[in-house]
Amino acid sequence: MVCRDASSPATASASLRAGLFCRVASLAALTACGIALATPLSAETISGALARAYGFNPDLNQQRAAGRATDENLPTALSGYRPTITATSDIGRVWQESNTATNVSSRAAASPRGSGLSITQNIWNGNRTANGVSRAESQILTAREQIRQSEQNILANAATSYMNVLRDTATLSLRRNNVDVLEQQLRQTRDRFQVGEVTRTDVAQAEASLAQGQADAFAAQSNLQTSIANFRQYVGIEPRDLQPARPLEKLVPRTLDNAIALSEMENPSIQAARHNVDSAALNVKIIEGQLYPSLGVTGAVARRYDPINQPGSNSFQASVVGSLSVPIYEGGAVYAAVRQAKEILGQAQLQADLQREQIRALVVSSWGVWSNSRAVIDASQAQVRAAEIALNGVREEAKVGQRTTLDVLNAQQALLNARVQLVSAQRDRVVSSYVLLASVGKLSASTLGLQVVAYDPTVHFDQVKGKWIGTGTPDGR
C-alpha cells in the first residue's frame, strides 16, 4: 500500500493548499507509508507537544538542576559572616619514669584528658565577604538567564521538530503519489509502444522518471524517520496524529525596530552576559581584598583533667583573643591574580558586546524570514496553480501528438516540486515565528499559554538562601 494524494491535479492542489494547517499525520497514513511508530497515543497539538517538552525534556531539566546548584553559592558566600565553631576532645595514658643523680627514681602514671570549644568570628577581611555575596547573586542571576535560554531553545526546537514531522509526512505522501502516477504513466507508455505510437526512447524516459521518483520517495521516508526521531528527542514521545499548527501572528513584534529593542531587554543571552560582567568586576574586588588587613576574634574554653605532673587535678581555661593580620608581601601572586582578573573582566565586557551584536543579527535574520514567509506561500500557491494548468495542457497536447512523453514527465515533475515547495513554505512560516519570538527573548510557557506549572527558580533559592545547617536538599535528597 502507498500513501495517495487526490487523484486529480485540481483536487490534489485544493488539499495541498491547506498544507500544514490541516491534519496530515494520522497514524493510519504514516503506517501506510511504512513509517513505524510507537504505541498508540492520543492526538497531539503543538501546544501539547511544547508543554510536554517544557516539563520533561532532560536537557532542560539538567539546566534547571545546574541553576539549583548555583543557588548554593549564596549560602557559601554568606558563611563568611558567620562564626566558625570547633569542638575538640582528647584522652590518653602517660607513663613517666625518672632517675636523679643520687639514684632516686620516681614513677608516675596519669590519664590526661580534656575537651574544648573555640569560636572564630571574622570582623573584617577587606570586604571579601560582602563582595563574594554580591558575586554569588550575580552568578545566580546568570544561571536563571541560562535556564530561560535553555527553555527557549527547547521550545523552539520542539516546535521545529513538530512542523518537520508534518512537512515530511506531507512530502512523503506527495512522493508516494508521484510514484503511483509514474507507474501508471509507464504502463500507458508501454501500451502505446506496443501499438507503435511512441518509441523505445519514450519508454526509457518513463522508466527513468519512475526510478527517480522511487528514489525520492525513499529519501522522503528517511527524512520523515529522522524528523520523528528528533521529535521524540525534544518532546519525549512518538508523534501521532499531529494537529493543525499556526504561526504566532499576534505574538511577534510588529516592526524590526521593535524586535531589536525588545531583544536588548529580554534576550536571556544578553542578560546573562551582563551578569557575567558584574560577576567578573566583583571578582576583581574579592582578589584585591587579599591585600587588605583582616580583623577577627576568637573565643575558646577548655577543661583538662589529670595532668601528668598533678594527677587527680583538673583545670579550666577561657580566653577571648582579637587578631589583626596585615599582609606585607606574598611573593607577587595576589598582584598577578588581580591583573589577571582585570583582563578577564575586559574579556567579559567584550563578550557582552559580541553577544549583543550576535543577537541583533539573529533578530534581523529571523525577522527577514518571518516577514517574507507570507509572500513565499502566496508565490508557491500561484506556482502550484500554474503548474496544474500547464500539466493539464501538456497532457491534452500529448494526446494529439503535439507533446512528447518527456514533456509530460517534466510537467508532472514541475507540479510535484511546486507542491513540495508549498509544503515547505507553510512549515517555514510557522517555524520562523517561533524562532523570531525566541530571538527577542519572549518564547516562554507563559507567553504561549501552555497548560503547565511554570518552573520558578526563586522557589529553590528562597528555600536555601538562609540555611545555616543541613545536608538535605529541599526535594528530599
Image (cartoon, rainbow, N blue to C red):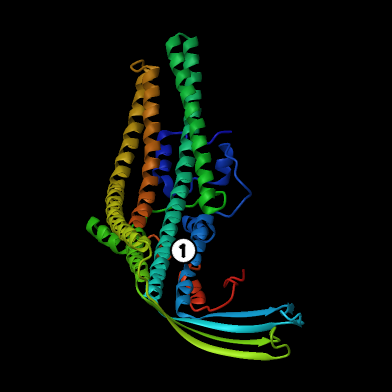
Q: Callout 1: few (<14), some (14-19), or many (20+) C-alpha neighbours within 10 Å?
A: some
Decide if residue 250 is in sight here.
no
Residue 12 image position (x, y, % from top left): 43, 37
- The quarter of the picture where the C terminus appears is bottom right
Q: In this orientation, which residue lies closer to the viewer: 467 or 269?
A: 467
* Residue for point 48% across, 76% down: 79
Q: In this orientation, which residue lies closer to the viewer: 221 or 242?
A: 221
Q: In this orientation, which residue lies closer to the viewer: 325 or 387?
A: 325
Residue matched to label 1 = 450
What number of labels is visible?
A: 1
* Disc 1 residue type (three-letter): Leu
Decide if residue 429 is in sight here.
yes
**In the figure, 40 relative to 258: above or below?**
above
Q: In this orientation, which residue lies closer to the viewer: 474 or 453?
A: 474
**In the figure, 412 relative to 453: above or below?**
above
Residue 293 image position (x, y, % from top left): 36, 76
| Mark 1 residue element | loop
- The quarter of the picture where the N terminus appears is top right
Which residue is situated farthest in the left direction here? Answer: 257
Q: Quadrant of residue 438?
A: bottom left
* Residue for point 51% across, 75% down: 464
**In the figure, 375 relative to 264: above or below?**
above
Residue 409 image position (x, y, % from top left): 40, 23
Residue 414 image position (x, y, % from top left): 36, 29
As drawn, is 96 to the left or to the right of 324? right
**In the figure, 225 relative to 463: above or below?**
above
